[in-house]
Image: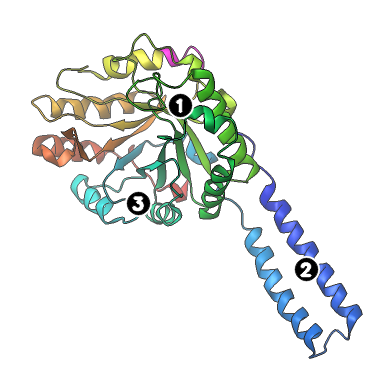
Amino acid sequence: MTRPHSHPLRRAAAVLVTAALFALTACTAGSSGSSGSGGSGGDTTSSSDGQSAQGAQEPAFDVTPLLDPKKKYLGVAVDGAPSSMNPVDHYAELIGKKPNIVASYSSWGDGFNVQGAKNALQSGALLYVSWEPFKPSVAKIADGSQDAYIKSFADDVREANAPVALSFGHEMNGGWYPWGTKTTKPADFVKAWRHIHDLFQEEGATNVIWTWSPNVINPVPSVKLKPYWPGDAYVDWVGVVGYWTTTGASTFDTLYGPTTKQIRHFTKKPFIISETASEPGQRRRADVRNLFKGVEDDPDFLGFVWFNITKRADWRVQASPLALAEFKRLAADADFGFDVRKQ
């Protein structure tokens, strides 16, 4: 993660200077204790400016301890969250533990869910946002024409003052999304990523964990990942997307290994499985067991986010009672889950 920007402190200093100049002007215009417009205005403004300066100086949420925590993340994507945390609470009851990542999806042009970020933090979790640039093109985002929107989004992220893992253009190495290989050049993707990152830094939105999220390479082995890599200075986590399907890889190493091996040729950034679930079937209980064991045994993996939503398949863990029981048993391990506010 890049060095925190000093923008909020400069704003605070500016507010204090403004307050001092106003007070000086009021004193020269009349007596300091006068009850006229100058005196009452000076008293009120001084109090207001003091509160504003105090608020502006509130330290930004420091995500540094969350970049490589001692315990593993146990995350979930579930319909309705984080605008409402009721679905997350229900999921927590199912698996016997509170998730500490709440994943969501945001189309380009949508506003940032400030209250959702606060809701997640209040429950001890961080918000994970997959930012999906359906339109305009990634090249348009890179050329600066979307800067006003990006800055507004960044300002809201900063004002939320909660940890946010942000993934722009996930699964960029596949051809199934408009920002994927069929329409977007790797150079444009990298340029857009860096441009967005730099604008966030300028706006003082330092409470972001930048998460670069390719799909596992198994279905697209000919697409190399390195050309899409923005660089170590622009990324905190590598968020691998990979699902367990009845006809696909059946072990942790065969599902994620080819991808992580390729990535290790150009970065040592830690991995998090940013989207996963197991397709219902006879193998589902074993898939759950392999997922937990693979993440627990590999120190390079920080944890995973379970996609507990029905889409193309019923990925919800409760769709299989045996898999749910196995999930609950393994989630009880003290190595999984922690309160992000206490790191």
Q: How many marks?
A: 3
- Sequence-first disc among 1 and 2: 2
Q: Is residue 327 above or below residue 10?
A: above
* Label 3 close to label 1 by CB (< 8 Å): no
Residue 242 within the magenta-colored segment of the rendering: no
Tell which of 277 and 176 is nearer to you. 176
Question: Picture coordinates of residue 1 (x, y %)?
Answer: 57, 33
Indicate the secondary structure of the residue bearing disc 1.
loop
Residue at which label 1 appears = 270
Q: Which residues are magenta?
A: 262-267
Q: Which disc is residue 82 wearing?
A: 3
Residue that label 2 marks: 19
Q: In screen coordinates, is 211 left or right of 57?
A: left
Residue at the (18%, 32%) spot, across then down: 312
In the image, residue 265 lies in the stretch drawn in magenta: yes
Amino acid beneath label 3? Pro
229 vs 93: above or below: above
Instruction: Write the residue at 13% across / 39% down.
Output: 325
Q: How would you classify the magenta stretch by its main secondary structure?
A: loop
Kind of residue at disc 1: Pro
Of label 3 and label 1, which has the lower sequence position?
3
230 sits to left or right of 288: right
Q: Quadrant of residue 291?
A: top left
Q: State the CA–CA distance, disc 3 to disc 1.
A: 25 Å
Q: Is residue 193 visible?
A: no
